[in-house]
Amino acid sequence: MSAQTYYVPEQSRFPIFMAVSLFLLVMGASSTINNLDNPDSNSSYILYAGLASLFTTMFFWFRQVIKEHLAGLDSNQLKTSYVYGMAWFIFSEVMFFAAFFGALFYVRSFAVPWLSGEGENGVGISALGLWEGFESTWPVITTPDKGAEYVLAEKSMAWPGWGHALEWLPLWNTIVLLSSSVTVHFAHIGLKNGDRKKFHRFLGITVGLALIFVGLQAAEYYEAYAYYGLTLNSGIYGSTFFMLTGFHGFHVMMGGFMLAVMLARSVFAGHFEDHDHFGFDGSAYEVAQLSFLSYESSHRLYQKFDLALTGPHLLAPH
């Protein structure tokens, strides 16, 4: 095969299966969160079906791509296109987070103050007499629409102060995520130097840290609902909280799964060479770099704009 020849695979149903899986996952997750206090709800079954479908699709899709690679169907030109494809994918995720944070900044800095009569636009709104007496606060504990049928958050999730910093769960989640960026880097070094034991050891630690992160975020969600009264029905505060943290948690979960696949391939099948391991590179870039940027950025914006973007802490008394 010529180095300038592309391998064009046959038509695949995997993208359709993946789209359906993601739809079930998102619908099931949001519905489950909104119906945690309803024992008769079947929302969790939709969530489980989405997860099962997602991981099944990824398994068979990965298997097909791996077979094509081992069969020598990947030319150098095609491998270069993989790199460009991953770069554009990461750029698209950066744009996702930019849109999410931009929407949150707009609500926090402009929309909510306008509703309380601040600024030129706020004066115009006040003159209409739409929401008299509404005060601008964040998080929004009261709503300008008195007849709205949603439950507002009972407590704020703001930074507890340095005296309680070690009790704040997002701090530990950030430490876990930063640590995973370091361990996956050492795993990469081990692979490039031909040291399989080092590669397996640090990659296994990275996968473990991803699992810890997802578990801690699940604990955040539980406490947000059980102790803070925060659900997807909690107005703009609840919707932005679950949109941002949910998107990020799903991102880390998928990245951890991909790295687990890379670990299994190396341990049980001896895949990857010191000069040819883009499957690992792509997964590592996805998890270590973008996850670090997204989670760190959320906390920096939180500090700068006083936005409660992440959940409550586990160790504080309730």
Image (spheres, helix red, strand yellow):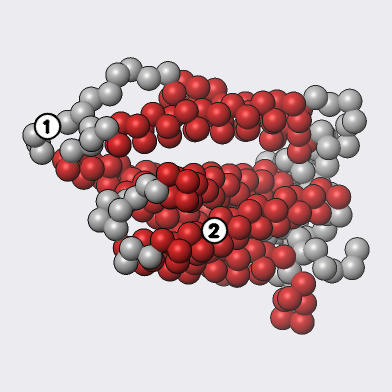
Q: Nearer the viewer, residue 232 or 130?
A: 232
Name the residue that disc number 1 marks: 1
Q: Residues within 10 Å of mark 2 (few under 14, many from 20)?
A: some
In the image, residue 98 above or below residue 145: below
What percent of the width, then of the height, locates residue 103?
54, 48
Q: Is residue 220 visible?
A: yes
Element assignment for label 1: loop
In the image: residue 20, left or right of residue 85: right
Name the residue that disc number 2 marks: 204
What percent of the width, then of the height, locates residue 144?
76, 44
At 73% from the left and 40% from the top, the residue drawn is 232
Element assignment for label 2: helix
**Disc 1 residue type?**
Met
At 34% from the left and 50% from the top, the residue drawn is 272
Q: Nearer the viewer, residue 265 or 248?
A: 265
Farthest bottom residue in view: 163
At 42% from the left and 32% from the top, the residue drawn is 63
